[in-house]
């Protein structure tokens, strides 16, 4: 057998409490491990193996059949979304992205989160039309063949449900994992036609200040969206990660309003009506609003505010003994690029700046990383993000100072739609098990 | 091709061509009229714009509710497996009385999305009646008040002044 590496030892001093190592150690692995080699790591070259490694059985037979559409390895069968309505009962269905089992920043199409009022409609793409009308000079309808000939753009953007992370509104920390707490955000490369291009063709009546976007699904989900956003960076998205948009993501087309709450990125889009005032749809009055105090209710708070959370390690990903680990997580802001992510391993007493995977894109998931040497003692991991607009991810105390203390404990699958973005804390005990706490 | 069709085609081509030249875009959208979109254009503004003809009372609504809504929303709008429609403020957080500033929203959503298994199958009279039933169960209107295109936009929802727009100040 190969001799076990000895305990990890880094020549680079800690930059923050409980073993956080300077992010620049990630830039040169040689530097990180140079000292380690001197202390005996990788000593297999000198150790005598008692038995030669066997030739594995899969190296001695032909491989499996290649299928027309590839699927993940059978060994990855646990990397799936969690469903709130698996039997398709007459109510909303949610599916949550397993961020603790994924890496990088792009969510595979089959793992993109879903919130759907009645499931997804079976739309014949040859018959689907997008109408743009209302306060325009000339109402127009577009089919997919027409849109295919328009100038297109490709952009990476996250979509996040306005109710993501809602379990953090609880008075007490919900014992749940990253998927249950933060699984209603995903990120894709979207390709489509700028809405502004189509509005140039319809013309815009100067009285138009908003538009109504409506889906072709059974409940005809609809939202009011400011014209300013439509002319800024809104897109009629046709492709998701290179292939046609997934059925539950709006096939054959969805509205993409980058950074704005997920519900406004209307799926199965078939109608845009330019209007003077918001229609006060159910999804902007009873839903996706936030009661601040008494009868006062916030409405039309669109961008998803700066947020981050540690995905590795996190509940369910138990550390296997002391030594070197990489702390990794996701950060994003509906107001632009992530400027900085800080990580703490001592519950916020000291912080180290994390490395960000390039390229750091506006309104897209950003992967942060930090090397860490765990000494086996209990720690509390946290991350905190800043965006280029100068917004800072709030602590719980900061958020509730503005909004008032949380009043109720909500079920983990419920979402009060309040744009919850406070710092998440994972307590890791001396067995390496992570637990959700309020740090 | 008839002369009328040729004329219509010529006119639409001119329109499309002029749009394309003006904006330097492909101009492949097909012109339609608002009348062509009448069946799609189901959105109701908070001022009642778009409300159809028809009328209904809470009593009429109660009979339809029992048949088409009660299975999911519970008797009298409470205790069902889906959203409560009639909890009094204080008993539940997200109530119609608190969270719906315009009664037109109830009509709009019911017509477009309900009942869950067969959306858009209710007649306009039925939608008015169900809207009236929900408003009465929330004690916003009386048991005998008829809802129609005239009366519905005038209903004073209890929290009509409680909504604070965060746009564009905080967008």
Image (tube, coloured by chain):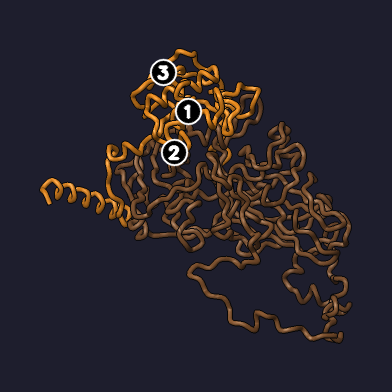
Residue that protrudes farthest toward the left in the picture? B3
Q: Which mark is residue B151?
A: 3
Chain B: its colour in the image is orange
Q: Secondary structure at mark 1?
A: helix
Q: Secondary structure at mark 2?
A: strand
- Report, in whole angstroms, how far the alpha carbon at label 3 lies from the one at label 1: 14 Å
Q: Residue at x 25, y 54 (%)?
A: B17
User: Which of the two discs, 3 and 1, labels the residue nearer the N terminus?
Assistant: 1
Q: Residue at x 65, y 66 (%)?
A: A75
Q: Is residue A251 left or right of residue A424?
A: left
- The image position of residue B143, as x and y in percent, is 48, 14
Camera-side residue of A66 and A280 = A66
Q: Is residue A310 left or right of residue B103?
A: right
Find residue A59 and report its image quarter: bottom right
- The image position of residue A164, as x and y in percent, is 63, 45
Q: Chain of mark 2?
A: A
**Residue named by callout 2:** A210
- The image position of residue A159, as x and y in percent, is 56, 51
Q: Chain of mark 1?
A: B
Find residue A71 and report its image quarter: bottom right
Camera-side residue of A331 and A67 = A67
Q: Which mark is residue B34?
A: none
**Residue named by callout 1:** B106
- Report, in whole angstroms, how far the alpha carbon at label 3 lies from the one at label 2: 26 Å
Q: Secondary structure at mark 3?
A: loop
Nearer the observer: mark 2 or 1; the answer is: 1
Q: Which chain is brown?
A: A
């Amino acid at each position: 057998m190969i001799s076990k590496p000895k305990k990890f030892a880094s020549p680079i001093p800690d930059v923050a409490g409980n073993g956080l190592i300077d992010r620049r150690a990630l830039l040169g692995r040689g530097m990180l491990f140079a000292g380690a080699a001197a202390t005996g790591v990788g000593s297999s070259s000198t150790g005598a193996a008692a038995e030669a490694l066997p030739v594995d059985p899969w190296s001695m037979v032909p491989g499996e059949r290649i299928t027309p559409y590839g699927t993940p390895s059978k060994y990855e069968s646990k990397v799936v979304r969690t469903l709130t309505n698996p039997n398709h009962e007459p109510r909303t269905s949610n599916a949550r992205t397993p961020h603790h089992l994924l890496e990088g920043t792009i969510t595979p199409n089959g793992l993109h989160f879903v919130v759907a009022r009645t499931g997804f409609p079976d739309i014949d793409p040859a018959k689907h039309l997008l109408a743009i009308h209302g306060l325009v000079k000339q109402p127009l309808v577009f089919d997919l063949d027409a849109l295919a000939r328009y100038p297109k753009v490709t952009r990476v953007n996250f979509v996040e449900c306005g109710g993501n992370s809602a379990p953090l509104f609880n008075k007490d920390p919900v014992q749940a994992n990253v998927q249950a707490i933060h699984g209603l955000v995903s990120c894709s490369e979207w390709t489509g036609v700028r809405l502004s291009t189509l509005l140039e063709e319809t013309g815009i009546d100067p009285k138009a200040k908003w538009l109504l976007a409506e889906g072709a699904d059974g409940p005809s989900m609809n939202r009011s969206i400011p014209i300013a956003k439509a002319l800024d960076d809104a897109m009629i998205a046709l492709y998701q990660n290179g292939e046609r948009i997934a059925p539950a993501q709006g096939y054959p087309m969805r509205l993409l309003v980058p950074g704005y709450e997920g519900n406004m990125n209307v799926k199965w889009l078939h109608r845009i009506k330019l209007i003077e005032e918001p229609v006060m749809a159910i999804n902007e009055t009873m839903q996706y609003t936030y009661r601040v105090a008494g009868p006062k209710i916030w409405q039309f708070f669109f961008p998803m505010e700066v947020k981050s959370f540690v995905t590795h390690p996190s509940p369910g990903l138990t550390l296997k003994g002391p030594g070197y680990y990489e702390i990794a997580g996701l950060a994003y802001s509906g107001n632009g690029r992530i400027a900085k992510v800080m990580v703490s391993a001592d519950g916020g007493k000291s912080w180290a700046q994390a490395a960000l995977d390039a390229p750091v894109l506006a309104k897209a998931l950003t992967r942060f990383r930090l090397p860490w040497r765990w000494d086996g003692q209990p720690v509390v991991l946290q991350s905190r993000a800043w965006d280029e607009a100068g917004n800072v991810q709030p602590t719980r105390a900061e958020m509730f100072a503005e909004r008032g203390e949380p009043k109720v404990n909500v079920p983990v699958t419920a979402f009060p739609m309040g744009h919850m973005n406070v710092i998440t804390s994972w307590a890791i005990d001396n067995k390496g098990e992570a637990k959700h706490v309020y740090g | 091709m008839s002369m009328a069709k040729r004329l219509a085609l010529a006119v639409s081509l001119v329109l499309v061509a002029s749009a394309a030249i003006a904006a330097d875009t492909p101009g492949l959208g097909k012109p339609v009229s608002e009348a062509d979109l009448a069946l799609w254009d189901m959105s109701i503004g908070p001022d009642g714009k778009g409300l159809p003809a028809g009328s209904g009372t809470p009593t009429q609504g109660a009979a339809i509710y029992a048949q088409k809504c009660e299975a999911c929303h519970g008797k009298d709008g409470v205790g069902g497996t889906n959203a409560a429609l009639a909890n009094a403020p204080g008993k539940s957080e997200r109530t119609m009385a608190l969270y719906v500033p315009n009664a037109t929203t109830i009509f709009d959503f019911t017509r477009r999305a309900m009942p869950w298994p067969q959306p858009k199958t209710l007649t306009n009279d039925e939608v008015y009646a169900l809207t009236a039933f929900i408003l009465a169960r929330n004690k916003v209107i009386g048991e005998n008040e008829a809802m129609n295109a005239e009366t519905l936009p005038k209903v004073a929802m209890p929290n009509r002044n409680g909504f604070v727009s965060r746009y564009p100040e905080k967008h």
